Image: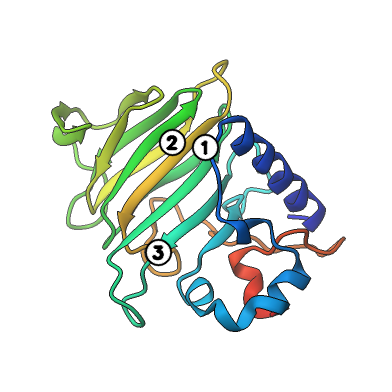
Amino acid sequence: MKRSEINNLIREALDFFDSMSFKLPPWAYWSHDDWKKNRVNCEEIFKNQLGWDLTDFGSDDFPGSGLLLFTIRNGNLKFDQKPYAEKIMIVGEGQVTPMHFHWSKMEDIINRGGGNLMMELYNSDDNEEFTDQPFEVSMDGIRKVLDPGSIIRLTPGESITLYQGLYHKFYGETGKGKVMVGEVSAVNDDHTDNRFHDELGRFPEIEEDEPPVHLLVGDYEKYL
Protein backbone atom coordinates (compact mmCIF):
# COMPACT_ATOMS: atom_id res chain seq x y z
CA MET A 1 0.00 0.00 0.00
CA LYS A 2 1.14 3.56 -0.62
CA ARG A 3 1.72 5.81 2.38
CA SER A 4 -0.45 8.46 0.73
CA GLU A 5 -3.35 5.98 0.65
CA ILE A 6 -2.80 5.10 4.31
CA ASN A 7 -2.69 8.78 5.29
CA ASN A 8 -5.99 9.41 3.49
CA LEU A 9 -7.61 6.38 5.12
CA ILE A 10 -6.62 7.60 8.58
CA ARG A 11 -7.95 11.09 7.84
CA GLU A 12 -11.25 9.55 6.70
CA ALA A 13 -11.30 7.36 9.82
CA LEU A 14 -10.87 10.39 12.09
CA ASP A 15 -13.77 12.10 10.32
CA PHE A 16 -15.92 8.97 10.67
CA PHE A 17 -15.16 8.53 14.37
CA ASP A 18 -15.96 12.19 14.90
CA SER A 19 -19.29 11.79 13.08
CA MET A 20 -20.07 8.87 15.41
CA SER A 21 -19.07 10.91 18.51
CA PHE A 22 -16.37 8.35 19.32
CA LYS A 23 -13.28 9.87 20.90
CA LEU A 24 -9.76 8.47 20.64
CA PRO A 25 -6.97 9.19 23.16
CA PRO A 26 -5.05 12.42 22.49
CA TRP A 27 -1.94 10.62 21.22
CA ALA A 28 -3.97 9.21 18.31
CA TYR A 29 -3.55 12.64 16.71
CA TRP A 30 0.19 13.04 17.34
CA SER A 31 2.53 13.92 14.52
CA HIS A 32 5.95 12.34 14.06
CA ASP A 33 7.49 15.26 15.99
CA ASP A 34 5.00 14.83 18.84
CA TRP A 35 6.04 11.18 19.14
CA LYS A 36 9.73 12.08 19.28
CA LYS A 37 9.08 14.62 22.05
CA ASN A 38 7.02 12.20 24.15
CA ARG A 39 8.53 8.81 23.37
CA VAL A 40 10.31 8.42 26.73
CA ASN A 41 6.94 8.01 28.46
CA CYS A 42 5.32 5.78 25.85
CA GLU A 43 6.88 2.39 26.55
CA GLU A 44 3.48 0.73 27.10
CA ILE A 45 2.21 2.00 23.75
CA PHE A 46 5.22 0.58 21.92
CA LYS A 47 5.48 -2.77 23.72
CA ASN A 48 1.75 -3.48 23.67
CA GLN A 49 1.24 -2.31 20.06
CA LEU A 50 -1.34 0.37 20.77
CA GLY A 51 -2.45 2.75 18.03
CA TRP A 52 -3.27 2.88 14.35
CA ASP A 53 -3.18 -0.30 12.29
CA LEU A 54 -4.49 -1.41 8.91
CA THR A 55 -4.10 -4.20 6.42
CA ASP A 56 -5.20 -5.23 2.95
CA PHE A 57 -4.38 -8.89 3.76
CA GLY A 58 -2.03 -8.91 0.78
CA SER A 59 -4.89 -8.29 -1.65
CA ASP A 60 -3.79 -4.91 -3.07
CA ASP A 61 -7.51 -4.12 -2.84
CA PHE A 62 -8.17 -2.42 0.49
CA PRO A 63 -11.83 -1.52 -0.25
CA GLY A 64 -12.54 -5.13 -1.17
CA SER A 65 -10.44 -6.91 1.46
CA GLY A 66 -9.02 -4.82 4.25
CA LEU A 67 -9.46 -3.49 7.76
CA LEU A 68 -8.59 -0.26 9.55
CA LEU A 69 -8.37 -0.34 13.33
CA PHE A 70 -7.08 1.45 16.38
CA THR A 71 -5.93 -0.52 19.41
CA ILE A 72 -6.98 1.56 22.40
CA ARG A 73 -5.67 -0.70 25.16
CA ASN A 74 -3.86 -4.04 25.30
CA GLY A 75 -1.85 -6.15 27.69
CA ASN A 76 1.44 -7.88 27.07
CA LEU A 77 1.99 -11.10 28.99
CA LYS A 78 5.76 -10.58 28.89
CA PHE A 79 5.73 -7.10 30.43
CA ASP A 80 2.59 -6.39 32.47
CA GLN A 81 -0.45 -7.86 34.20
CA LYS A 82 -3.21 -6.39 32.02
CA PRO A 83 -5.26 -9.39 30.74
CA TYR A 84 -7.53 -7.52 28.32
CA ALA A 85 -7.59 -5.48 25.12
CA GLU A 86 -9.93 -3.12 23.28
CA LYS A 87 -10.02 -2.06 19.62
CA ILE A 88 -12.19 0.15 17.48
CA MET A 89 -12.45 -0.73 13.80
CA ILE A 90 -14.04 0.57 10.61
CA VAL A 91 -15.54 -1.94 8.17
CA GLY A 92 -16.75 -0.73 4.79
CA GLU A 93 -19.67 -2.03 2.75
CA GLY A 94 -18.57 -5.34 1.25
CA GLN A 95 -15.06 -4.93 2.72
CA VAL A 96 -14.04 -8.42 3.79
CA THR A 97 -11.88 -9.48 6.71
CA PRO A 98 -11.07 -13.04 5.57
CA MET A 99 -11.90 -16.26 7.43
CA HIS A 100 -9.73 -16.76 10.50
CA PHE A 101 -9.69 -17.76 14.14
CA HIS A 102 -7.50 -17.20 17.19
CA TRP A 103 -5.71 -19.92 19.16
CA SER A 104 -5.46 -17.88 22.37
CA LYS A 105 -7.74 -14.86 22.22
CA MET A 106 -11.43 -14.89 23.14
CA GLU A 107 -13.25 -11.78 21.98
CA ASP A 108 -16.53 -9.94 21.78
CA ILE A 109 -17.24 -8.21 18.46
CA ILE A 110 -19.68 -5.32 18.87
CA ASN A 111 -21.50 -3.19 16.31
CA ARG A 112 -20.96 0.26 17.83
CA GLY A 113 -22.91 2.11 15.14
CA GLY A 114 -23.34 2.90 11.47
CA GLY A 115 -24.33 0.06 9.15
CA ASN A 116 -24.80 -3.67 9.74
CA LEU A 117 -21.95 -6.12 10.24
CA MET A 118 -22.32 -9.47 8.47
CA MET A 119 -20.39 -12.44 9.86
CA GLU A 120 -19.94 -15.95 8.46
CA LEU A 121 -19.03 -18.64 11.01
CA TYR A 122 -17.62 -22.17 11.13
CA ASN A 123 -16.31 -24.17 14.04
CA SER A 124 -12.92 -25.88 13.57
CA ASP A 125 -11.74 -29.44 14.16
CA ASP A 126 -8.47 -30.79 15.52
CA ASN A 127 -6.87 -30.27 12.10
CA GLU A 128 -8.00 -26.61 12.03
CA GLU A 129 -10.45 -27.27 9.21
CA PHE A 130 -14.16 -26.47 9.06
CA THR A 131 -16.48 -28.92 10.81
CA ASP A 132 -19.88 -30.00 9.49
CA GLN A 133 -21.46 -29.97 12.95
CA PRO A 134 -23.74 -27.32 14.53
CA PHE A 135 -22.16 -25.18 17.22
CA GLU A 136 -23.17 -22.72 19.91
CA VAL A 137 -22.46 -19.00 20.16
CA SER A 138 -23.48 -16.32 22.62
CA MET A 139 -25.00 -13.09 21.26
CA ASP A 140 -25.42 -10.45 23.95
CA GLY A 141 -25.69 -13.22 26.52
CA ILE A 142 -28.27 -15.22 24.56
CA ARG A 143 -27.28 -18.73 23.47
CA LYS A 144 -27.83 -19.61 19.82
CA VAL A 145 -27.17 -22.84 17.91
CA LEU A 146 -25.85 -22.26 14.38
CA ASP A 147 -25.16 -24.47 11.39
CA PRO A 148 -21.73 -24.41 9.71
CA GLY A 149 -21.45 -21.46 7.36
CA SER A 150 -24.25 -19.52 9.05
CA ILE A 151 -24.25 -15.81 8.30
CA ILE A 152 -25.43 -13.56 11.11
CA ARG A 153 -26.25 -9.86 10.98
CA LEU A 154 -25.14 -7.58 13.81
CA THR A 155 -27.15 -4.37 13.84
CA PRO A 156 -25.96 -1.36 15.89
CA GLY A 157 -25.76 -2.32 19.54
CA GLU A 158 -25.57 -6.08 18.93
CA SER A 159 -22.55 -8.25 19.67
CA ILE A 160 -21.25 -11.82 19.51
CA THR A 161 -18.72 -13.71 21.59
CA LEU A 162 -16.10 -15.55 19.53
CA TYR A 163 -14.39 -18.41 21.28
CA GLN A 164 -10.93 -19.75 20.46
CA GLY A 165 -11.00 -21.88 17.32
CA LEU A 166 -14.21 -20.37 15.93
CA TYR A 167 -13.62 -19.32 12.33
CA HIS A 168 -15.15 -15.96 11.40
CA LYS A 169 -15.26 -13.75 8.32
CA PHE A 170 -16.97 -10.36 8.36
CA TYR A 171 -17.92 -7.44 6.12
CA GLY A 172 -20.30 -4.50 6.03
CA GLU A 173 -23.74 -5.11 4.58
CA THR A 174 -24.08 -3.49 1.16
CA GLY A 175 -26.27 -0.40 1.11
CA LYS A 176 -26.10 0.23 4.87
CA GLY A 177 -22.93 2.31 5.16
CA LYS A 178 -19.68 1.95 7.07
CA VAL A 179 -19.73 0.08 10.37
CA MET A 180 -17.97 1.16 13.54
CA VAL A 181 -16.97 -2.12 15.14
CA GLY A 182 -15.70 -2.56 18.68
CA GLU A 183 -13.63 -5.44 19.98
CA VAL A 184 -13.23 -6.33 23.65
CA SER A 185 -10.95 -9.31 24.18
CA ALA A 186 -8.20 -11.06 26.01
CA VAL A 187 -4.67 -9.84 25.30
CA ASN A 188 -4.19 -9.41 21.55
CA ASP A 189 -1.10 -10.47 19.59
CA ASP A 190 -1.55 -10.16 15.83
CA HIS A 191 1.95 -11.50 15.21
CA THR A 192 1.28 -14.97 16.64
CA ASP A 193 -2.46 -15.52 17.23
CA ASN A 194 -4.17 -15.29 13.82
CA ARG A 195 -4.96 -18.53 12.00
CA PHE A 196 -6.25 -17.60 8.54
CA HIS A 197 -8.01 -20.45 6.74
CA ASP A 198 -6.17 -19.46 3.57
CA GLU A 199 -2.63 -18.16 3.96
CA LEU A 200 -2.66 -14.35 3.89
CA GLY A 201 -0.52 -11.40 4.83
CA ARG A 202 -1.41 -9.44 7.95
CA PHE A 203 0.91 -6.41 7.84
CA PRO A 204 1.22 -4.53 4.51
CA GLU A 205 4.33 -3.60 2.62
CA ILE A 206 4.31 0.21 2.46
CA GLU A 207 5.53 2.31 -0.44
CA GLU A 208 6.77 5.53 1.15
CA ASP A 209 5.57 8.04 -1.43
CA GLU A 210 5.04 10.70 1.28
CA PRO A 211 5.75 11.05 5.02
CA PRO A 212 3.30 9.48 7.48
CA VAL A 213 0.73 11.85 8.96
CA HIS A 214 0.12 9.51 11.92
CA LEU A 215 2.31 6.53 12.74
CA LEU A 216 1.06 2.95 12.51
CA VAL A 217 1.99 0.39 15.14
CA GLY A 218 4.37 -1.07 12.56
CA ASP A 219 6.10 2.31 12.19
CA TYR A 220 7.28 2.76 15.78
CA GLU A 221 10.54 0.87 15.43
CA LYS A 222 11.34 2.43 12.05
CA TYR A 223 10.58 6.06 12.88
CA LEU A 224 11.25 6.25 16.62
Kindly identify which numbered label has been placed on residue 74: 3
Q: What amino acid type should be assigned to the residue bearing mark 1?
A: Val
Which residue is found at the position 31% from the left and 76% from the top?
77
Q: What amino acid type should be assigned to the residue bearing mark 3?
A: Asn
Which residue is found at the position 41% from the left and 24% from the top?
156
User: Looking at the image, can residue 205 be seen?
Assistant: yes
Q: Is residue 88 left or right of residue 16?
A: left
Residue 44, x across and y down, in percent:
47, 75
Residue 169, x across and y down, in percent:
40, 39
Q: Considering the numbered disc 3 on the image, is that residue within a helix, a strand or a loop?
A: strand
Which is nearer the eye, 23 or 72?
23
Badge 2 crowding class, 10 Å Cα cut-off, few under 14, some 14 to 19, many 20 or more, is many
Which is nearer the eye, 9 or 57?
9
- Are the two marked residues, 2 and 1, in contact with CB atoms closer than 8 angstroms? yes
Pointer 1 residue: 96
Is 108 drawn above or below residue 171 in the view shown?
A: below
Q: Quadrant of residue 177?
A: top right
Rounded to the nearest angstrom, the CA distance separating label 3 from label 2 is: 22 Å
The mark nearer the N terminus, 3 or 2, is 3
Q: Considering the numbered disc 1 on the image, is that residue within a helix, a strand or a loop?
A: loop
Q: Quadrant of the C terminus?
A: bottom right
Pointer 2 residue: 170
Q: Quadrant of the N terminus?
A: bottom right
Q: What amino acid type should be assigned to the residue bearing mark 2?
A: Phe
Badge 3 crowding class, 10 Å Cα cut-off, few under 14, some 14 to 19, many 20 or more, is many
Residue 22, x across and y down, in percent:
53, 39
